[in-house]
Structure formats: C-alpha cells, structure tokens
Image (tube, grey):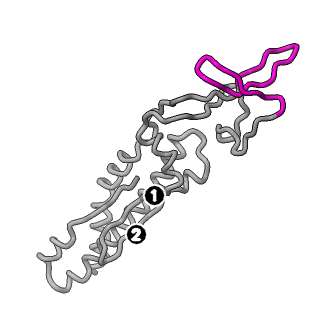
Amino acid sequence: MTITIETNAKKVAKSISRKAKKHIPRATKFALNNTAKKLQKAYKVQAEKKLDRPVKFTVNSFRIGFASPKRLIAFVAISDAAAKYMKWAIDGGVSGRRAVPTKNAKLNKYGNLPNKTKLKANQEIRKTKTGFGVWSAATKKAPGKLLVAFKSSVNYQKIFPFYKIGTNLVNRVLPKEMNKSFKKELR
C-alpha cells in the first residue's frame, strides 16, 4: 500500500531560464521529501488514534522512499510485514479462518492473544454452535468457558483511512513546500 507523489517539474523547467533550470529539480526534491516526512509523521499519529492499542511495530511500519533530482518521486508505504494485517484496517472486508478471542480469554496488553499460545492441560477443543473452540476444563463448581472460537470468516470494518489521510495532507502541504523550497533555491 503506497501513496506516490509526482510533479510536473520537467514541463515547468522548459519554460524557465537556464540558471533557474538547475535549481528546479533540487527544489522539487526537497519539497517532495519534506512532504513525505510530514505524511509519515501524520500516519504514525493517526495510527495511534484510530487503531486499538497498536504495537510499536505497527506505528513504525510506515516507510519513506525519498526523491532525488533525477527521480522526482517520493512515497510513503507500509512495510510488507505490517501490510498483511493492516490491509484489513484500511480496506475492510472478509478474511478466511481466524481464531477469535472471547471475553474469557487472557489477552496481552495490546488486546491480542499472546504470540505463543498453546493448549494447556486444563483446556480442551470442543464443538461450539458455529464450529470449534478452545474451552477451559469444566470443574465440579463451574462448567467450562469458551476461551477462543475458530471462525470460518471474520468481517472487518474500515477503521484506518490511509488514502484519505495521504491525499488530504499532500494536497494541503505540497504546494506550501514547493513555494518554500523554490524560494530557498532561487536565492
């Protein structure tokens, strides 16, 4: 998942003096890179706000591809590892088989099942209304409780507006960055 920023600097360069032509690619590079840095920061802030207790790995998964004077393209992308699960928060949709924790399950501080969850001696796999699940063992005082249900599919809602954040920020920030870097370069 990537947002790419491109400009029409080459067309503009044709209509400007020779001396100024040298500075246009550099000014454009600085504007694109500064915009990409601000976009990365905005994604990190919004990930903290929109996602429920995100891990640092998720918040820091936004990567920048910097522009150069010869390649005037900058982008902000999500790392491949994070993109595998962030796609559900960005696009929503229906996923395949999943283990879904219930209110009886012990979760880590981020609200997820612990990474190396294994079936313990006092737990068993039994049938549920919708398939199978992991149950705590029944005792004389209490029946077993459903800890984890295995669902054939899970519906996800769009909760992280990746494209909207990127488009709005680029439309707002890039023109200002272009003006600022052109003034600086032409001095």
Count of numbered marks: 2
Image position, residue 179 (x, y; %): 27, 67
Instruction: Determine the residue positioned at 33% across, 68% down.
Output: 31
With respect to residue 17, does 48 lie above or below? above
Asked whether disc 1 touches disc 2, contact meaning CB atoms under 8 Å apart, the reply is no
Is residue 183 within the magenta segment?
A: no
* Element carrying mark 1: helix
Give the magenta-colored segment's residue range: 121-146
Dot 2 surroundings within 10 Å: few (below 14), some, or many (20 or more)? some
Looking at the picture, which amino acid does disc 1 mark?
Answer: Gln
With respect to residue 170, does 142 lie above or below? above
**Residue beneath label 2, please?**
66
* Element carrying mark 2: loop
Rounded to the nearest angstrom, the CA distance separating label 1 from label 2 is: 12 Å
**Residue beneath label 1, please?**
40
Image position, residue 41 (x, y; %): 47, 56
Image position, residue 11 (x, y; %): 15, 71
Looking at the picture, which amino acid does disc 2 mark?
Answer: Phe
Instruction: Determine the residue positioned at 49% across, 46% down.
Output: 86
User: Residue 142 has which mark?
Assistant: none
Classify residue 83 as left or right of residue 106.
Answer: left
Instruction: Determine the residue positioned at 19% across, 73% down.
Output: 10
